[in-house]
Amino acid sequence: MPGCHQANGVTKDCCSGKEYRRTQMQKEMIIEKLKAHGGRITKQRLMLLDIILENECSSCKEIFYKASKIDHKIGTATVYRMINALEEIGAISRKNMYRVAYSSECAMEDACTVVLDDDTTYHLSAKMWNKVVQEGLQACGYAKDQKLVSVTIKPCDCDVNQERREV
């Protein structure tokens, strides 16, 4: 797309500024909610909010890593407190995303549990899980010579098999 660029795997429409306006609106709404719940709006909190809105971080650790590159004085407790505050106001949910990152060399046993609709259950080692996903991606034409690095999974909010889902 002309006039657009890709950042963190997301193509941003720089011509119309839609991505920026959407993120800016989210940021303003979240700030207002934080204020309404008695939260202080500090420079570090604003920085953390920018990191969360502009990146697809899957853990507090990843947010802290990105934040510490910007402000080396930030502590992990600040990140956890901000995440908890954002959860309390409903801006984010840590239950809505999981990032799985097992290399093909990882020796972890029972890294993944797969349950089929007939209640057949498979406990896969990290190596086997990686192999299943890698070969599935190749069989479907998504990967050729690339190696799997990580998978980010967001649970479905639909009611199908709701009783099976464990969070």
Image (cartoon, rainbow, N blue to C red):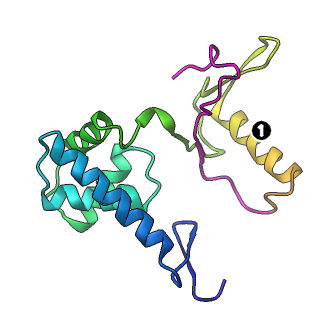
Q: Looking at the picture, how far across and down is residue 104, in whole percent?
A: 66, 45
Residue at 82% from the left image edge and 12% from the top image edge: 118
Magenta stretch prevailing secondary structure: loop
Q: Secondary structure at mark 1?
A: helix
Count of numbered circles on the image: 1
Residue at the spot x=67%, y=52% of the render? 148
Going by the image, does 126 lie left or right of 92? Answer: right
Counting from the top left corner in percent of width and height, residue 61 is at: 34, 46
**165 to the left or right of 20:** right
Residue 69, image x, y percentages: 27, 65
User: Residue 26 magenta-drawn?
Assistant: no
Q: Is residue 74 above or below residue 78?
A: below
Residue annotated with mark 1:
132
Of 94 and 20, the residue lying toward us: 20
Can residue 78 be spotted in the picture? Answer: no
Q: Residue furthest top?
A: 119
Residue sticking out furthest to the bottom = 2
Q: Position of residue 116 (x, y in %)?
A: 78, 19
Apparent side of residue 126 relative to residue 122 in the rendered image (left or right)? left
Quarter of the image holding residue 52? bottom left
* 29 over 25 or under it: above or below: above
Q: Looking at the picture, which amino acid does disc 1 mark?
A: Val
Give, as a single range, the part of the protein colored magenta: 145-167
Quarter where residue 90 is shown? top left
- Quadrant for the N terminus, please: bottom right
Q: Please indicate, yes or no, whether residue 129 appears anywhere in the rendered image.
A: yes
Vertical arrangement, residue 73 with respect to residue 119, above or below: below
Residue at image x 59%, y 49%? 150
Category of crowding for the residue at label 1, using alpha-carbon neighbours closer than 10 angstroms: few (below 14), some (14–19), many (at least 20): few
Closer to the camera in the image, 99 or 42: 42
